[in-house]
Image (tube, rainbow, N blue to C red):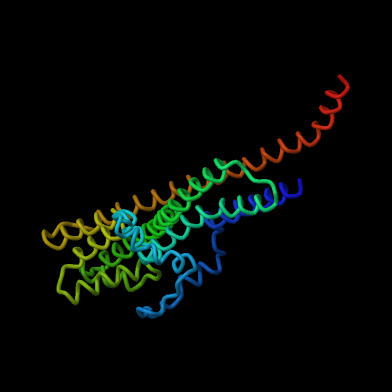
Amino acid sequence: MIAFLALSMGVGLGLWALTYWIFPLPPPLTELISRIHAVPSPPEGPGTRQQGWAERLGAPFARVLSALGLPTSSVRKDLTVIGRPVEAYLGEKAALTLAGLCLPTAVELILTIGGHPLPWAIPLGGALALAVGGFLLPDVSVTAGAEHRRAAFRHALSAYLNLIHILLAGGAGVEGALTDAAEIGHGQPFQRIRSALNTARLTRTSPWTMLGQLGDEVGVSELSELAASLSLAGTEGAKIRASLAAKAAALRSRDAAEAEGRANAATERMALPGVLMGFGFVLFVFYPALVQIEASL
């Protein structure tokens, strides 16, 4: 019984840690405000990036996964969005897969030494299940991180459109409004927009072309649509102010709808622990009475 309780506590602690790693708590408001006003650090050199334990452990197997065609094009785009190297992703995938294969074997070895071995099918099935879970877990983490970055990019793009609309209303040209609006904003989305505009200026390319490429790179279709609208304004003289105002309003409406959906989902998730606690309380109160009734019959 003591060994069973210890194993149950270990499994519960592991599930809690895994859940906390997949769904981390949101950062405090002070940290978010400091990120807005933070000064970007200089880019790291080729040998200054710190490697995690998973990347170091799975590095010998990363070439095997790369030879199998991993990562896929969609995952590679997500890795670009979150700024994560492909080698780190492949190393973590290999390390978690190996950990999933070895963990049930280690548990079975400990139980065998203690004189309580399990049937061979249980550790084999657990090893296969954990290996598949470890193989797919980095994909889930990368996809969730990329979606979070894209949502932040759309939010920043809405503010960027409003700034362009104000500058155009003040009499600025299209290219000047693009550059000045990008210089006003802070954060990674505005940094990437400024980088795209600087690349366009240095390569003597139209800024809407580089913005369209940036939209395709980060997977934000709204930025690609903005680049197409700006291309019409720059090449054919189309009126762009009303179109930008409409796009900004549509982005704000979408952000509000997504925030409301997330709030409703969080409310529904909060009801589940209450129901489970109520069920446990009822079971705790009525179980002794039921046992006594059954014993008296």
Percent of width and height locating residue 261: 47, 45
Picture layout, residue 211 above or below residue 50 = above
* Residue 161 visible within the image: yes
Residue at 83% over, 23% down = 294
Whether residue 128 sits left or right of residue 70 in the image: it is right
Percent of width and height locating residue 163: 33, 65
Picture layout, residue 189 above or below residue 295 = below
- Of the 4 image quadrants, the one containing the C terminus is top right
Number of labels in the image equals: 0
The furthest residue to the top: 297
Residue at 31% over, 70% down = 182
The one nearer the camera, 197 or 123, is: 123
* Residue 220 visible within the image: no
Percent of width and height locating residue 101: 50, 52
Percent of width and height locating residue 16: 61, 53
The furthest residue to the left: 236
The one nearer the camera, 136 or 40, is: 136
Whether residue 128 sits left or right of residue 82 in the image: it is right
Q: Quadrant of residue 143?
A: bottom left
- Of the 4 image quadrants, the one containing the N terminus is top right
The one nearer the camera, 180 or 20, is: 20
